[in-house]
Amino acid sequence: MIRITKIFTFETAHVLYNYDGKCKNMHGHSYKLFVTVKGTPINDLNHPKNGMVIDFGDIKKIVKEEITEIWDHAVLVHGGSPHIELGQDLEQKGHKVIYCDFQPTCENMLYAIASRIKSRLPDGISLAYLKLHETENSYGEWIAEEN
Ligand SMILES: Nc1nc2c(c(=O)[nH]1)N=C([C@H](O)[C@H](O)COP(=O)(O)OP(=O)(O)OP(=O)(O)O)CN2
Ligand SMILES: [Zn+2]
């Protein structure tokens, strides 16, 4: 069994409803996401992916389609909070708004990322680990064995 990791970056704004610190204000981060999957490398001379657990390019496609293309240069707001009005106002002014069914913290973003990636992985490949940096010094982790 081998783990392989691909790293992504995306620029996203968020606003934390009812938070008691500076992040109650809308602000952005250069998020850095580490995606680790595990599986057994293909051992078949006739297979174009011989020697690979999964093509790094396939991980990239999944993460782009499920996460980065959606969240990049968007504002994440908690759609189940009064911030829905803030989002609607921004949308009317032409901004890209994503309504989350959760407070858009690093922790909850990790749950959402895990769920979306898991739904796209082929049989025999599983999600092992995620790390999401909000800042250089602040990050959260999702570990398969704990979820
Ligand atoms: N457990 C969490 N705490 C905080 C989150 C979070 O998602 N989970 N988010 C924020 C803010 O959105 C933002 O990330 C600020 O975090 P913080 O590390 O406090 O920001 P700094 O600018 O001080 O970061 P440095 O890297 O230390 O400069 C707040 N808390
Ligand atoms: Zn933040």
Image (spheres, helix red, strand yellow):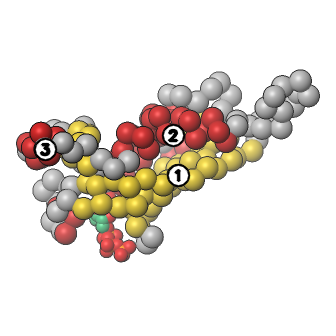
Q: Nearer the viewer, mark 3 or mark 1?
A: 3
Residue corresponding to mark 1: 8
Circles 1 and 2: CB distance less than 8 Å? Answer: yes
Q: Quadrant of ligand 1?
A: bottom left
The earlier-in-sequence mark between 1 and 2 is: 1
In 3D space, how far apart are the residues under numbered discs 3 and 2 (Cα atoms)? 28 Å
Q: Is mark 3 within 8 Å of ligand 2?
A: no
The earlier-in-sequence mark between 3 and 2 is: 2
Amino acid carrying label 3: it is Lys
SS for dot 2: helix
Q: How many marks?
A: 3
Q: Nearer the viewer, mark 3 or mark 2?
A: 3
Percent position of residue 92, x then y: 12, 39
Mark 2, residues whose alpha carbon is within 10 Å: few (<14), some, or many (≥20)?
many
Residue corresponding to mark 3: 93
Circles 3 and 1: CB distance less than 8 Å? Answer: no
Percent position of residue 8, x then y: 52, 52
Can you tell which mark lies on residue 63? 2
Does the rendering let one see residue 109? no
Q: Quadrant of residue 80?
A: top left
